[in-house]
Image (spheres, rainbow, N blue to C red):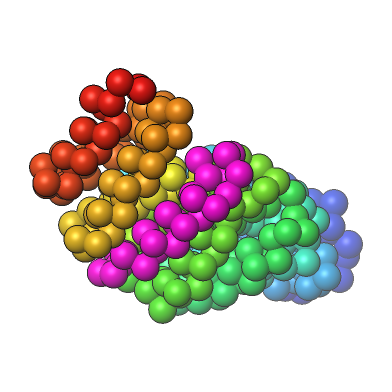
């Protein structure tokens, strides 16, 4: 009521209101979390659009500390769900500072984890589109922003893959491109993990495997290792969809690594938790024989 009718300057209290109202959305009393949602909605509508960005950090911190593992937040599951938070998050993601963009991305992942699937569905497109757009401009952002975006996209793939399916082609390009990001190994690791989650929901993985193998062969050591890590995540999550030719290419990649001063041993050991299931469940002895004969039994090793 106050935000709807008052002409007084209440900007000093905005952060406090976010903390209180968003926390009350987790109250188990229907009357309480419904009233908190209505107050939160009215409050956000009273804030000028060009003043929303500073609210994204306290909003994300409050969402992060709201709820508990294994259950959703009651106030997020109301008919209009998380709609009051959307303008703040989009403002932070698209026009905020680097820190605000990073926290906005993490806020999206936090909301996905704390909201019922049917309640979050109307907001998938408004969230995913800006995330991908910012990701395509990632060269101008620090690693923290990139990791936040990749983390949010990975969370969406884990929890609501069916809803982000229309974005699969763009997500694939985003993850593969970020796998070779020169600025940070942490960015490359997060991209590799996200690509594995994405491929779990894709029937055709051979083209991605071919692209990763090409990248691993043609890049410097640090980037090559990231490509191999991405390949390991893909094989772990989607080994059942790997074709015969792609399997042979994976074996050849490891064999070539062994031939280069036996460095393949450390490479294989590093990613053994991901490769092991694929090699011992999906690779036939016929494919492994050349690798064993030329690399493991060779006197040069």
**Label total for image:** 0
* Residue at the image position 38 percent from the left and 42 percent from the top: 256
Residue 243 picture quarter:
bottom left
Q: Position of residue 134 (x, y in %)?
A: 67, 66
Residue 108 picture quarter:
bottom right
The correct choice, above or below, for 52 with respect to 122 in the image is above
Magenta region: 200-225
Q: Position of residue 14 (x, y in %)?
A: 76, 54
Q: Is residue 137 left or right of residue 270?
A: right
* Residue at the image position 51 percent from the left and 55 percent from the top: 215
Q: Nearer the viewer, residue 167 or 130?
A: 167
Q: Is residue 11 left or right of residue 127?
A: right
The correct choice, above or below, for 28 with respect to 206 in the image is above
Magenta-drawn stretch contains 268: no
Magenta-drawn stretch contains 206: yes
Q: Is residue 3 left or right of residue 240?
A: right
Q: Residue furthest left?
A: 285
Q: Nearer the viewer, residue 239 or 90?
A: 239
> Can the viewer see residue 210 in this picture?
yes
Q: Position of residue 129 (x, y in %)?
A: 57, 74
Residue 279 picture quarter:
top left
The correct choice, above or below, for 6 with respect to 32 in the image is below
* Residue at the image position 57 percent from the left and 61 percent from the top: 177
Q: Nearer the viewer, residue 128 or 49?
A: 128
């Amino acid at each position: 009521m106050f935000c709807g009718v008052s002409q007084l300057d209440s900007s000093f209290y905005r952060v406090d209101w976010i903390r209180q109202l968003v926390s009350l959305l987790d109250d188990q009393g229907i009357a309480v979390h419904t009233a908190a949602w209505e107050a939160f909605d009215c409050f956000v509508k009273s804030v000028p659009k060009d003043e929303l960005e500073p609210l994204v950090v306290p909003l994300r911190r409050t969402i992060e500390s709201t709820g508990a593992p294994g259950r959703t937040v009651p106030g997020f599951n109301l008919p209009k769900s998380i709609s009051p938070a959307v303008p703040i998050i989009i403002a932070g993601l698209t026009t905020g500072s680097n820190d605000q963009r990073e926290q906005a991305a993490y806020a999206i992942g936090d909301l996905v984890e704390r909201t019922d699937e049917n309640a979050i569905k109307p907001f998938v497109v408004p969230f995913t589109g800006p995330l991908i757009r910012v990701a395509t401009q990632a060269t101008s952002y620090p690693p923290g922003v990139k990791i936040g975006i990749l983390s949010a996209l990975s969370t969406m793939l884990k929890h609501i893959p069916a809803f982000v399916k229309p974005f699969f082609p763009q997500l694939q390009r985003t993850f593969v491109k970020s796998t070779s990001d020169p600025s940070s190994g942490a960015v490359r690791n997060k991209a590799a993990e996200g690509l594995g989650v994405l491929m779990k929901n894709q029937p055709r993985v051979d083209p991605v495997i071919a692209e990763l193998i090409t990248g691993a062969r043609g890049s410097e050591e640090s980037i090559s290792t990231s490509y191999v890590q991405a390949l390991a995540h893909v094989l772990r999550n989607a080994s059942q969809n790997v074709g015969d030719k792609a399997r042979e290419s994976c074996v050849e990649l490891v064999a070539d690594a062994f031939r280069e001063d036996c460095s393949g041993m450390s490479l294989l050991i590093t990613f053994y938790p991901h490769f092991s299931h694929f090699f011992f469940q999906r690779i036939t002895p016929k494919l492994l024989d050349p690798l064993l004969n030329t690399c493991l039994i060779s006197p040069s090793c």
